[in-house]
Every structure is written in structure tokens, then in C-alpha cells.
Image (cartoon, rainbow, N blue to C red):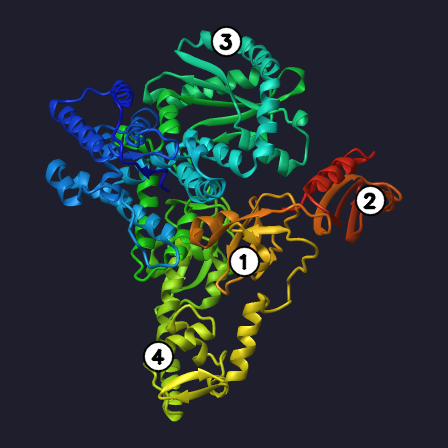
Amino acid sequence: MKNRTTSIPPNTEEEKKLIRRSYRRLLRGVKSKLNAEDQNNIRKAYELAVDAHKTQRRKSGEPYILHPIEVARICVEEIGLGPTGIICALLHDVVEDTDISLKYIGEEFGGKIAMIVDGLTKFKDLDTLSPQAENFKKVLSTMAKDVRVVLIKMADRLHNMRTLGSMPPHKQLKIASETNYIYAPLAHRLGLYNMKTEFQDLTMKILNPEEYHDVAQKLKETKRDRNQYINEFVKPLEHKLDAIGVPYRIFGRPKSISSIWNKLKTKGVAFEEIYDLFAIRIIVDVPLGIEKNICWQVYTIVTETNTPIPERLKDWITTPKANGYESLHTTVIGPKGRFVEVQIRSERMHEIAEKGFAAHWKYKGVKQTNFDVFSVWLDNVREILDNPGNDPVEFIKDFKTNLFNEEIYVFTPKGDMKILPEGATALDFAFYIHSEVGYHCKAVKVNNLLVPLGHKLKSGDQVSVETNKSQKPSESWLNYVITGKARSKIRSSMKEEVRKKGEMGKETLMRKMKNIKADFESNADMLVTHFGFVSRPDLYYAIFKEELNIQQELKKFKVEGGKLTLIEEEKKETKKAEKSGVASTKGRRNFKGKPLLLIDNKPASQFKHSLATCCAPVLGDPVFAYITAQGEAKIHRNTCPNAEHLMANYAYRMMKAEWVDSDNTDFVTTLLITGIDGRGVAQKITGFITNDLKLDMRSISMDGNQGFFQGRIKVVVKNKDQLHLTMKSLKEMDGVYSVIREE
């Protein structure tokens, strides 16, 4: 993402003062003492960047150099990087955006700086299906050599998100979706909790602005009561904590807006009914050798003062999370019967929790800190990267599965502990041990019992794998795994199998074309496009599998001078359909009245288009257009479950879309309703919808169980305002607990 424009006038004197102030602020944030060489290189990098970017401005109009300076400050103050990180952050855009060459960077600052800057420099003029995926793959490839590449990239994205307001709305949408899709999970996996939270809040502010401001306003209104309650909870603890004689800090930490919104959605409750809007954090300043003992001592004080909920205890001190996170979490019943989450950790643990992977270097020489989990994770990323010909979009999907939030702990027959994502299977475990073990996995035993390859593992399982050299992966294995490493290795093996079988399909095609005197090379790519395949190997494989009867299909062409030409009648029909913008009526909506929609500021009638069934947008929903491989514009809601994936990997196919007012329209949307079950509840609700709200229904299903009901109703509405009014009216009905629009 580039928040940049090029401008002829250089920086004014006032702007130069602002730049110098920003640079001094950066230097004040450096906590470690810099030697003379570091000071000299930082100053040299700053002066080079200032001169290189002097005629460039951001979309907001401010000098562009303020961006790399701020990225460097984030690297120092919020992530904890040192001199090398500062230099690379200052230079991270000069090769991509100016005439400065990578060779010059290497000559001036050395090979390591040049390597990191190269990792941060995007490919130019990529002829690829997904430039974003290709560039992100490049970042991660360099990360495997030096993790500072991805940490600086995260700082770069954070500052861009903080200053996104000057970008056009459709660009904001693309960038926010990409951030939520890959950068927020990556921040979590690297242990950068504050950054992850801010990414999620900033993306929510763009993707769900109404909900964001609603939660933010309610948090503001309840801040005073919340602070009073925190003081009430903390007061009886302080005297007992003072008695153990160790330095400590205790404070309340509000939950993020996005996490509160997720609870509102998943639990289907009102804001007023969520009690855990904050967590109490107790941080002790003690030496490494007594950290665990003191943390458990603090836990005893907390649970003696308040009633604990045993099943809510999370011990990440004994077994840290896969991203190195260490802390004791428990939930207790505080004053007035409210649930309160308490987090207990040492200052060392807190620094790791705040700065994640960056703190790894500071503590990696300290025993008992379990930082080998980072090395294992990086090894997995390297293995995914090492697969030759790995498609960038497939790579991003595989990589994302390594960014899991929850994990399980399983054991080898020798008792070695392995950390896998929640939901991992027996076959995932085999590939996790070693690629060759996975390739030749014949059977798996869990706790000495034979299980299917797709058996889901649980924490505490002991797993053993039996192999056979003659065993090979099959396509069905992709259904048995969830981890990126396993999927990548299986897919790589299958590609080799497809290539071999494709060669036989290619021979069949060459023979058929020779029979009709058609030249193979000059027609092969045309056939790939005509039949809708991505590449020649895909066409060859389909012929081998007999999914495409090439002998019959070739009868639709005539041969002129060795070239295949579609028979004229069919060609005319195809052109006629394309001109009318309708290739098929299947799955399409008929739009009546004046134009409902603008796509790229043009009437939607000029495009082949339809509403996406995955999110069922209605008039008034913020939407975007996604151009499919077949050239059709699919209209999705900004909050569509598929939006993040599409925008993160296929942003070049996105087009701006916006509604035009119209009364002569209708949209079908699905409402999920829960409440107290009783006689005639279905009749009562349907009667209210049809008689009081005057709406048509397309379908209804209700399921009652032990005094509780769940209903799924498809209703026809004119626009988003009518939908909101419908949901509000239904929720006000006696016995109705929640009304949610199906995502």
C-alpha cells in the first residue's frame, strides 16, 4: 500500500523543522546506548532518506519522510528493535520509490541492511494473478533469514493504518481487509498483542464503522463506573500483596473495542449484559528463579479473596503459548457477583507479552523461557517456502494456518512435547514430525489405539506414526489436514503426480490436433482460455482424467491455416450474450426500475453482475465489486465473510461499487432469532412480520428445546434502514432474546 504522491515543490522551512522534531523524538525513544558507529549510520540513513523523499508527499499533503521516521519510532518504542531496525525502517521505501539502488545501500550500510531493505521492497510490474500475495511471500522469504524484516513491515502497516483517513474509501476497504486477513493474525503469532489489538480495532473502524462507534461511545459512557468497580476490586488485594514483600503493579486494562464487538456477536447479548469489559493485571518484579512461585502465590491471594471459577484457569507459565506468551489467567467472581478476569505475570513475561518476538533476542540466552517455539515455527515457514512452484495465493493460505490463536500440546512416544494448532489431526502430526514421515504415513496410533488419519488430536494425547516406503499421499489427504506445512507438502506431491499424468493428456491433445491438421503450439493457449483453465497443465490433466472430451469439443472448431476458429454460429451467440451482459440467468437477480448500483462510477447495467449469495447485500449496505475469472462482477458486502480473503489476495480484481436510491427493489436477507420457547411462538413471530411489519417471508425454520427456541427466517426488505427497523421491532417482542442478521 502506498499512501504517497509525488510533488515538485520541496519541503518548506516549516516542514523541515517538523521533520527535525520528528527525528529528535525518534532518537529520544532509543533506550539502549548507541555507539559512535550506530549514531553515525542512523544519521546517515536519516539524511539519505530525507534527500531521497524530498519531493514526495503523502495523500494527506504532509512530507513523505515523516512516514519512515514514524515507522522507525514504532520499531523502537512499540516493538523494541535496535540500531539496525532504525536504519532499515528509515530506508524501507527509498529503493522502491526513489532512484537510490539496492547496490548503493549495500555499499553505504553493509550487506545485512541491504538484505533487509530488499525484503521490504515490493516487486514492480508483476505479471501475476496476485501481486499482494507475491510481495508478501517475498517479505516472509526474507523473514526466514532475519525476522526484523517482518517486524519492520508490521510497523509500516501500523502507521499506514493509523493514517488511512486520507485514502479514498474503496482503498481503505482493501487495505483494512488485507490487514485483518494477514497482519493481525501475524501480530498475534509473533506475540505483538498490542499491535494485534490495534490492527483489529482500526480495521473494525473501517469495515464496521457504525458498530465501532456504538461500542466506543458506550465504553466512554461507562468509563467512570468501570473505574470505580476496578478500585473496589483492587483495594482488598493490595494489603495482602504488600505482605508478600515483592514489588508489584496492579491495574485494570479495558478490553479492546473489537473483542467486545466479537462477544456481542457470538453471544447475541446487549452491551449492558457483558460484564468482562476489562481485565485486572498484576505484574511482579522478581528474579527469574522465583517467578513461577511468586505468580502462584499471587494467584492464591486472588482466589482466597474472591471465588474462583476453576475451569477458567489458564496456566501459560508452566506451558507457554506457541508464540512465547507466559501468564496465569483466571476468572473470579468479584463484588456484586460480576465475573472478573485476572492476569498474573512477571515483568519479564510482561515485556515478552508486549513486544513478542522482538523480546526474544533479549531473553533467548535465558534458560527455562521456552523460546524454541519461535525456531520451530520459523522452520515450518521455511519448509512451506521451500516448495518449488508454490502458488503465492496457496502459499498465503498455507501460511495463515500457521497463525493459529489456540494450540494443543501432544507427545511423541518418547515423551517430547509438540505444539500444534487446535483442530490438528493425526496426519498433521506425522508431517509436523518430518515431511518424509508424513509422505509415507501408513497408520497412526493415539494413546495406543489405531485411529483414522483425519482423527482430531487433543491436548495430552500421545501419538505414534507407522510408515511404509511404498505409501504415497493421495488427493483425499488434503481433507485430513489443517496445517500449512501438511497441506503444502501434500499439494506439492500431488502437483508432481498431476504433471506426470498431464504429460499423457498432452500427448492425447497433440495427437487429436495432428489428425485435424491443427498446429499445437499456436492453438494450445487459446484452448486453455476457451475452456476456462488457468494453465496448460490444468488442460492436459482434465483431458487425461476424461473430464474434457477433447475429441467432441474439437468438433466445435474449424481449421484454417493450421489455426482453430470457433464455428461462426456459436461465436455470434457468444458475442451476443457478452454484449447484452448476460451469459446465464442462473443464480442472477433481475434488477427492476432505475439503476440500483454504480460499479466504478458507471451504471451496473454496463457490466455482467449479480449479488453474492454468501453475504446477500441489500440496498444501503456498504459494498464492493469483485470481478470473477469469468468476467462477472459479484457484489459483496464490505463485511462479507469472504471479503478479507478476496481483498488480501485479489485486490487487483476489486472495483468500487455504491448504491443508487430506488424504491422499486427488494432483497432477501436471513435473520437468526433466539428466545424463550412457548406455545404458538412461531405463529406469533410470523404474524408480527406479515401483519404488523407488512413484510413478505421466503422461508422459516424454528427449533424449540427445553424452553429455548432458535429460528431462521428469510424476509424481503427494501433497504438496510428497513432491515434495521425490522430487527429492532422483533427484538422488542416479548420473549425474543436476540435478533442477528446472518453473516
Q: Which residue is mark 2?
A: 689
Q: Which of the two discs, 4 and 1, sits closer to the camera?
A: 1
Mark 1–mark 3 Cα distance, whole angstroms, equals: 61 Å
Q: Earlier in the sequence, mark 4 or mark 1?
A: 4
At mark 2, the secondary structure is helix
Q: Earlier in the sequence, mark 1 or mark 3?
A: 3
Q: Residues within 10 Å of mark 3 (few under 14, many from 20)?
A: some
Mark 1–mark 2 Cα distance, whole angstroms, equals: 33 Å
Q: Which of the two discs, 1 and 3, sits closer to the camera?
A: 1
Residue 636's place in the image compared with 196, above or below, is below
Q: Position of residue 741 (x, y in %)?
A: 68, 43
Which numbered disc covers residue 503? 4
Q: Quadrant of the N terminus?
A: top left
Q: Which of the two discs, 2 and 4, sits closer to the camera?
A: 2
Q: Which residue is mark 1?
A: 633
Residue at x 76% of width, y 46% of height = 711
